[in-house]
Amino acid sequence: MGQDNTFDEMWGREDGLRAPYRSYSAWLEGEDPKRLRAKQREAERLFRLTGITFNVYGRSEAEERLIPFDIVPRIISGQEWQKLRRGIEQRVRAINAFLHDIYHEQEIVKAGRIPQEMISRNAAFLPHMIGVRPPGGIYTHIVGIDLVRTDDDQFYVLEDNARTPSGVSYMLENRETMLQMFPELFSQNRVQPVQNYPAHLRQSLAACAPAGSAERPTVAVLTPGIFNSAYFEHAFLADQMGVELVEGHDLAIVDGHVAMRTTMGYRRIDVLYRRVDDDFLDPLNFNPESQLGVPGIMDVYRAGRITIANAPGTGIADDKAIYSYMPEIVEFYTGERALLENVPTWRCAEPDALAYVLDNLEDLVVKEVHGSGGYGMLIGPTATKKDLAAFRRKLKARPSNYIAQPTLSLSTVPIFNRAGLTPRHVDLRPFVLMSPGGIRITPGGLTRVALKKGSLVVNSSQGGGTKDTWVLED
């Protein structure tokens, strides 16, 4: 079932069914393929009815697409999940501590664990946050940690998403769709629930409200608007939490607080879950051309009168060069060895690393340090000579803009198509909520799947799809 000795999460390496899939596989063997094909079509119809789409940029105009959904779940045992959960929690605590440190004492720089220029010259470092302590000391209210698997017991962190992680709406809709189509499977397999994420998100955000807020703090979701690629998710989460979805023009500074316009006049907001990038958040403090943010919101924030989730300036933790230091960051702030490993990473800003990368480009994956969505990336083994030559020029011109990593053999999970069950590469984005009361991790997360045979690129913007992710109770 696996391809080229790739680890398959259903079949392992030696065509022996793995334990988490036994109950599901027994059910699957008794199913008529015609019924499953009909269910796959039904899933597509449900997604279309719900309006689960995303926008693809880079064309003459944004194109709206349906995200492909596969009906074969990705199944993780309870024991596997416990190990992942501990590693994710450790990592998120370290990231939050790192953000506090770099905007205050910079002890990690003084200790020589990270070079000063890695912070001060980083485009995502926000000088406006120096000396600012967010309400409750929380910078990373919502985090997505991208994981890949290469073997039965080997997971790696591929990326940290601490700025505005997206995709949780697809996780929730994937589960809702599977519950509608195959309700019997969930009791048979004792799958842990994910549906309470919106309630947990609201509770977690409210727990981060600034001092002096009402007993039931007012929470709102700030969206850039309907033309944003993740607008569906912004509207979905606001609706599921029972809070207002607002745009910049709906907000104003009233009596030193951020307030939203209502039919009854302005109403104060305590917590703003923003899906607007730092640069567009406040035209008085950042990009003066921005029509998406709120003039003066950073002054209210620095005065401690509103919580912005995630905190401004968290984007530096998404930087792929900073990622390469995460083992040191985890150890520095927790005193423990990192439970989840990083993918080995060459920082092209370093001359020896650049020389190695240029000599071995056809074997490596090269990424922009601030890149996302699978854009601006080279996968050496599948690149053309023209692509390789173009990236050599880019690396020589701006080496500090890139990191490189080995091409990992990502695990596969079967998808259901005309050929039956066919292996495809996957990753996993678990979602983490952090508040002064603790850390809550939804069991599972968003499994993204590369639908093209042999492809390692799982991003929806590059043709990838999604699966429901089951974490079992055992």
Image (cartoon, rainbow, N blue to C red):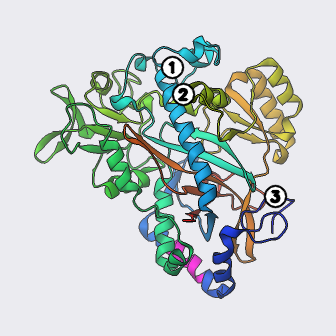
Extreme residue in the right direction: 359
**Position of residue 340 measured from the top left corner of the image (x, y, whole percent):** 65, 41
For the residues labelled 2 and 1, the Cα–Cα distance comes to 10 Å
Badge 3 marks a residue whose secondary structure is: loop
Q: Earlier in the sequence, mark 2 or mark 1?
A: 1
Q: Are marks 2 and 1 in contact (CB under 8 Å)?
A: yes
Q: How crowded is mark 1: few (under 14 residues within 10 Å), some or many (20 or more)?
A: many
Q: Is residue 16 left or right of residue 330?
A: right
- Identify the element where label 2 is drawn: helix
Which quadrant would the N terminus be assigned to in this image? Answer: bottom right
Q: Is residue 58 visible?
A: no
Query: SS for tag 1?
Result: helix
Q: Which amino acid does label 3 sit on?
A: Thr
The reply to whether residue 288 is in sight is yes
In this rendering, the label closer to the viewer, 2 or 1:
1
Magenta stretch bounds: 38-45
The CA span between labels 3 and 1 is 40 Å
**Residue at image location 76% in from the left, 37% down from the top:** 405
> What residue does disc 3 label?
6
Does label 3 or label 2 sit earlier along the sequence? 3
| Relative depth, front residue between 193 and 83 | 83
Where is residue 461 shown, x and y percent of the image? 60, 51
